[in-house]
Amino acid sequence: SYFYFTKDYIYFSQNDEQIIYQIDYAGQNFNVVLKVDIDGLEFHDFVVYQDKIWLNYTDNSIPDETKQKFCVYDIQTQKWIKFDRGSLGKINNGWIYYLDDAHQLYRFHCKSYCVELVCEKKIEAFDFYDSYILYLTEDSLYRFNTTENTKILLASQLGDSNYFWNIQ
């Protein structure tokens, strides 16, 4: 089962159904938004953004295919677009940020569909704060935006309780 919340609706699927439902927060306006009836396509997760459903999927019609792929379904036009690159991740300012198999941080633009490498380092985790991306590597925590990439904490400082008492 998957859930995704927008300002106006709750989107969800149940168990192994390849159907995405929509309902408003008052429990009204229940609709089937998407029934995935493409032979072999099995979605694994989804997000809803800008009237589109972004999905990670596997194409089971290709023998021995196990790699997850990425696509979008436009709710208004009811059209699919499959992409060679991209993945679900965290959405921020029109971009989907995600880690690839090598744990490098990429971003996928939701309108132009371009993909950009954000950071070549092996990333353990990332999130957004203010206008920054905070990301953690094996040895450091960084603050990144279009004008800076600053190391703000070394992993070796995590074991030093005095370090945190001295932070201004």
Image (tube, helix red, strand yellow):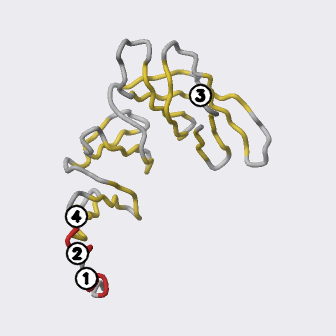
Other-residue count near label 2 (Cα within 10 Å), few / some / many at <14 / 14–19 / ≥20 = few
Sooner in the amino-acid sequence: mark 4 or mark 2: 4
Q: Which of the numbered marks, if any, corresponds to residue 163?
A: 1
Q: Residue at x 26, y 86 (%)?
A: 162
Q: Residue at x 50, y 23 (%)?
A: 42
Measure how far apart labels 3 and 1 are at the Cα level.
Answer: 49 Å
Measure how far apart labels 2 and 3 are at the Cα level.
Answer: 45 Å
Other-residue count near label 4 (Cα within 10 Å), few / some / many at <14 / 14–19 / ≥20 = some
Tell me whether circle 2 and circle 1 mark residues in contact (CB < 8 Å): yes
| Res. 74 image quadrant | top right
Task: Specify the quadrant that holds the C terminus.
Answer: bottom left
Q: Residue at x 38, y 39 (%)?
A: 109
Q: Amino acid at mark 4?
A: Ser
Q: Secondary structure at mark 3?
A: loop
Q: Nearer the viewer, mark 3 or mark 4?
A: 3
Where does residue 89 sit, x and y in percent of width and height?
Answer: 42, 44
Left or right position of 122 against 60: left
Q: Which of the numbered marks, if any, corresponds to residue 157?
A: 2
Q: Which of the numbered marks, if any, corresponds to residue 140?
A: 4
Q: Which of the numbered marks, if any, corresponds to residue 16?
A: 3
Q: Amino acid at mark 1?
A: Tyr
Q: Amino acid at mark 3?
A: Asp
Where does residue 90 sit, x and y in percent of width and height?
Answer: 43, 48
Q: Amino acid at mark 2?
A: Gln
